[in-house]
Image (tube, helix red, strand yellow):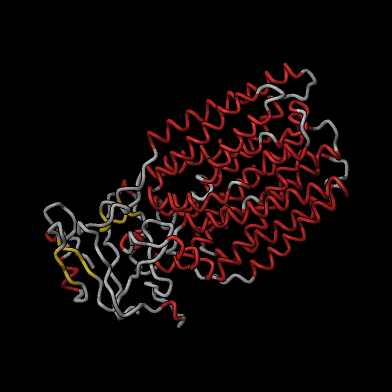
Amino acid sequence: MVNEDPSHEGLDGAPSQTSALQENPNLAAQPSVSGHPSISAHPSFSAHASTSAHPSVSIHPSVSVYPSSSAHPSTLAQPSGLVQPSSSGQPSSSGPEDLSVIKVSKRRWAVVLLFSCYSMCNAFQWIQYGSINNIFMNFYGVSAFAIDWLSMCYMLTYPLLLPVAWLLEKFGLRTIALTGSALNCLGAWVKLGSLKPHLFPVTVLGQVICSVAQVFILGMPSRIASVWFGANEVSTACSIAVFGNQLGIAIGFLVPPVLVPNIKDKAELAYHISIMFYIIAGVATLLFILVVIVFKEKPKHAPSRAQSLSYTLASPDASYLNSIIRLFKNLNFVLLIISYGLNAGAFYSLSTLLNRMVILHYPGEEVNAGRIGLTIIIAGMFGAVISGIWLDRTKTYKETTLVVYVMTLVGMVVYTFTLNLGYLWVVFITAGAMGFFMTGYLPLGFEFAVELTYPESEGMSSGLLNVSAQIFGIIFTISQGQIIDTYGTMPGNIFLCVFLTLGVALTAFIRADLRRQKANKETPENKLQEEEESKTSKAPTPVSEEHL
């Protein structure tokens, strides 16, 4: 342990490493290029360069630096190699300035809230057409399928995740945040050039730009949570980040039916559409400016033991492709990818087709259709936040995910058989209950994925989950839309119920291998310390033979 007595502090006020060297002979002080002593790992410990979309995470898949009661080969460290310092002898620039301090930053809340806001703006632009699709069909003179594609283009562009994940590794969080918010702003302004009935291609262009922006957004919640938040806050922070996206969808259901009434005069209709487009363009511009000012790459200190260890083991030569291969060799993660995609894909399909389904049973109720969508999302936001807080307190990732998934299926079944009863208030209640669990599941999937894949990149695991969601979203939206047009809403919703049942079964087979929790529990004295308390703790010690 580091002796934190003032008499043992260095000239810079930081705790001296001398006592740590005395207590642990496995640590050797080696001169670095900069002249400062650096700590090398015991020869029995090996941290191999590997591929990770996270710039600070790099461990060979067969290496686990966290003791486990299991005798699985993956828990055995290789008997050779050292943790290599950077050329300067100091921690890599991809990590915080001082790895010997584990402390959270006050700025973390500003970062996650700002991200949540521009994610909200982008999500609004996704659903603003679908929530009043009959009005835009009338204005542009196009089919319902064409308007549906304004939503599905968000799903179609998501394979761009792969180069974006590489950019995240190459340039970091701030660059990705700036790019995402800038594209979101640009797309909003392009749409202002489509206020004539013959300019539908222009509005498609603006929507495609916004869809590219969301590729820079959807994979970031768990990454921001890990880089900026302590071990007891990551799930809550991830929920807040996802909360913004859901709030944007909620506003997208509520505001367009209010701002854009269903009128026949196209000149007046263009005026109402322009008001909506100008508002969203102004908000997107303000958020971009705030991102430039507020959003930082990383905090000064690592917020948790797991994150500090990730920085310590970082490799600048990590192979991006190998990281993807390792993730797909993780059976638990593959099961989660499929089950998450089924749930999120069903949500995307319901959101896109909700206006059409409600109007089929309740003609002229465009405003209430939007309010039903709002109810689904608001209920889901409460579900997401409650789930995040519950996970931070209990760490029951597998159990919570499975229960929420089962309740999503139950809610979907009830909604399916009550939609056509003729009572809107019943639809509000059943849709809200379904939304509480269906959208509340989304942050659970992100955090469960990080636990199953640590120390691989949070951005990579989240991105692959979203790729699955987009693929299933396109398939479900097209298929359910065709079923509704041919057979009605009930068969279309039963179609989703079948796949949600499959998702429940797959989730039940996932083994709860919580790797990040093992890292954070490596030392019992490692606990979250608030910056305002100005308390520090020792950096993680390289693992010795006794641990392994």
Decide if residue 109 is on the left or right side of residue 510. left
Residue at 77 percent across and 37 percent down: it is 144
| Drawn side of residue 530 relative to residue 321, left or right | left
Q: Quadrant of the C terminus?
A: bottom left
Quick one: 412 or 151, which is closer to the camera? 151
Which residue is located at x 83 percent, y 30 percent?
Answer: 364
> Picture coordinates of residue 440 (x, y %)?
62, 51
Question: In the image, 134: left or right of 53?
Answer: right
Q: Number of callouts in the render?
A: 0
Tell me where residue 226 appears, x and y as whole percent: 42, 54
Against 286, residue 448 (above or below) is below
Quadrant assignment, res 424: top right
Residue drawn at x 56%, y 49% is: 385
Q: Quadrant of the N terminus?
A: bottom left
Of residues 121 and 16, the one drawn nearer to the viewer in this rendering:
121
Residue 64, quarter of picture: bottom left
Whether residue 322 is situated above or below residue 392 in the rendered picture? below
The answer to which of 304 and 268 lies nearer the viewer is: 268
* Image coords of residue 307 (percent x, y): 37, 59
Q: Is residue 417 above or below residue 190?
A: below
Please provide percent x and percent y for residue 149: 70, 41
Q: Is residue 192 above or below residue 103?
A: above
Looking at the image, which residue sits at the far bottom?
71
Residue 333 seen in render:
yes
> Is residue 237 visible to us here?
no
